[in-house]
Amino acid sequence: MTGPEDGTAAAHGVASGVGRTALLVAAARAIETHRPDALARDPLAEHFVRASPASAHWPLHPDQVPDAEADPLWGRLGRYFGLRTRVLDDHLLAAARAGTRQVVILGAGLDSRAYRLDWPPGRVLHEIDTEQVLAFKRAVLDAAGAAPATERRPLAADLRGDWAGPLLEGGFDPAEPTAWLAEGLLLYLPAEAERRLMATVHRLSAPGSTLAYELKDVAAEPPAVRTAPAYVAARERLGIDLRALFDAGPRPDSAAELTRLGWTVAVRSPYDFTALHGRGPAPEPDDALAANRWVFAARRGRPGGTPGGIPGGIPGRR
């Protein structure tokens, strides 16, 4: 059991830099949870936000956001995170219900899918992140008395280095199909680290595996987007300079590389899913979300096609 003093020390892992963005996403999920038309519900999110001094004063409920969805930070950007959560929840559950038994969440942050989703029996979730982030997460979950809904295997590793060895040592089976997820991760990695990560995912993926990830070509954003309300609000109100944290170099075309390696790939705009679900952020001038894309890939080879139609249609369609 992790004691309070351990949790306080571990909180430093999410108090600054990229770690602090995990708190931003957790707060957005907490607010989304309390919306009457919630796209996703995460009852553990508010525990993470309140456990860190860096975010203890942030809102957790729509009533605490004066301008509601018009607020560029907790309204529009927050709704984006709620939509992303729902879409990727649907993606992973579709793969699991189609028979995939192991899930790997790369850069898991404060993700609570092992606890809040209705997993079929016998599924295993591997969560990879830094030791500090995982220690903070463990302390908060222990304090909340949370119990996972399926087997969860956290793994402390640096995704810019060698993480395949520890994952294999932790019981991961490369001969079995895997559902991989890189949510809000690649935006912060240098191009070469992304290439290595994708090569490792491919090497460890049996036919029938799926991969979902988010990409954003910051270098291609028009200059006017640099002062988009969401970026300004995050910097001035939370001390999070998102653009400074994003890797600004040219991005590799990982979708094209996966296609070359034999994966079926679909690249979607978040606004595709706003239209699908009837709620979520809409395009706007000088849009901080315009360059965001969600990529869904499946490695061909398993009889019967890819799980749940992924990625040929829009994941999450019901």
Image: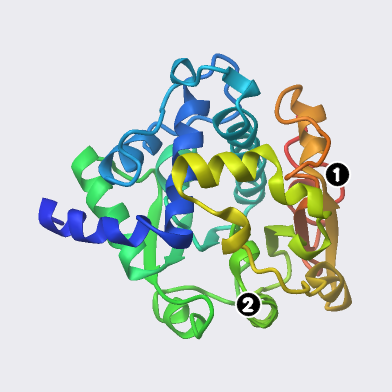
Residue at the (79%, 75%) spot, across then down: 252
Number of on-image labels: 2
Residues under labels 1 and 2: Cα distance? 26 Å
In front of the other: 98 or 156:
156
x and y percentages locating residue 159 in the rendered image:
51, 75
The numbered disc on residue 197 is 2
In front of the other: 68 or 222:
222
Q: Is residue 119 visible?
A: no
Looking at the rendered structure, the secondary structure element under dot 1 is loop
- Depth-wise, is mark 1 or mark 2 nearer the camera? 2
Quadrant of the drawing holding the C terminus: top right
Where residue 200 sits, quadrant-wise, is bottom right
**Residue flagged by tag 1: what amino acid is it?**
Gly
Looking at the rendered structure, the secondary structure element under dot 2 is helix
Crowding near pointer 1: few (<14 within 10 Å), some, many (20+)?
few
Residue at the (39%, 75%) spot, across then down: 170
Taking the image as shown, residue 310 lies to the left or right of residue 80, namely: right
